[in-house]
Image: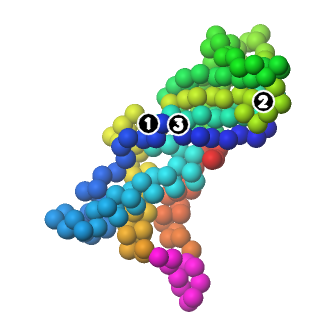
């Protein structure tokens, strides 16, 4: 079963601020010439972090598309945290769109990544053969920057500082450098089981 993700409503705020990022980059707060670059680095760092770890940091609406319902009773959402399931739609065996009743399943966010579990005695409907036969729309990410774990924020700040200091490919002895081990370890610790 192939799974694809699409962000339909992007975050409207970032988990770290320009002020925090400038401090991490050792840039005086009064110096504003690089503010646009640092702001774009903040966005790039968050997007990279989310793609690598499957952990979405700020509120956003995401659609997960699959070719069919799971062969077992559980569907792993592959990303976390997930605040709520907006809808589950599917193309039935005649390729007619339908919405799955929320009475048929339970959303379980006590595990990471969260799952949708078919209720006892229920079964998944048969779907049409197409890559987006099932679409799960959900609200994902922490509710606010204040709830984002500090380890995640520190990882972003390290990446922003690295992007600021190295605006081109970092090389050692003529070869592309391996990512800083501390940053790499922090990023690895944040990964969920599912990935983009």
User: Which residue was labeled with disc 2?
Assistant: 68
Q: Residue at x 57, y 88 (%)?
A: 174
Residue for point 50% across, 34% down: 61
Mark 1 or 3, nearer chain start = 3
Please rate how many residues cluster around mark 2, counting C-alpha atoms within 10 Å: few if below 14, some from 14 to 19, many from 20.
many
Whether residue 188 sits left or right of residue 37 in the image: it is right
Whole-angstrom CA distance, mark 1 to mark 3, is: 11 Å
Q: CA distance from mark 2 to mark 3?
A: 21 Å
Viewer-proximal residue, 151 or 138? 138
Q: Badge 1 local density, few (<14 within 10 Å), some, or many (20+)?
A: many
Residue 18 falls inside the magenta stretch: no
The range drawn in magenta is: 168-177
What label sits on residue 59 in the rendered view? 1
Q: Nearer the viewer, mark 1 or mark 3?
A: 3
Q: Which label was assigned to residue 8?
A: 3
- Residue 96 is situated, as x and y percent measured from the top left of the image, at 75, 19
Residue 124 in view: no
Residue 32 percent coordinates (x, y): 22, 65
> Furthest-left residue in view?
30
Taking the image as shown, residue 185 lies to the left or right of residue 26, namely right
């Amino acid at each position: 079963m192939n799974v694809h993700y699409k962000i339909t409503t992007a975050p409207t705020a970032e988990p770290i601020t320009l002020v925090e990022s400038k401090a991490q980059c050792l840039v005086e707060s009064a110096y504003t010439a690089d503010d646009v670059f640092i702001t774009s680095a903040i966005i790039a760092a968050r997007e990279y972090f989310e793609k690598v770890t499957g952990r979405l940091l700020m509120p956003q609406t995401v659609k997960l598309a699959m070719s069919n319902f799971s062969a077992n009773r559980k569907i792993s959402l592959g990303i976390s945290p997930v605040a709520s399931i907006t809808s589950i739609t599917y193309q039935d065996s005649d390729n007619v769109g339908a919405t799955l009743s929320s009475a048929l399943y339970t959303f379980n966010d006590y595990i990471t990544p969260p799952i949708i579990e078919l209720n006892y005695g229920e079964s998944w409907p048969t779907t049409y053969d197409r890559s987006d036969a099932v679409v799960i729309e959900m609200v994902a990410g922490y509710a606010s920057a204040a709830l984002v774990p500090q380890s995640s924020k520190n990882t972003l700040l390290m990446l922003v500082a690295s992007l600021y200091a190295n605006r081109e490919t970092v090389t050692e002895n003529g070869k592309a450098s391996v990512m800083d081990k501390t940053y790499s370890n922090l990023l690895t610790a944040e990964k969920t089981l599912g990935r983009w």
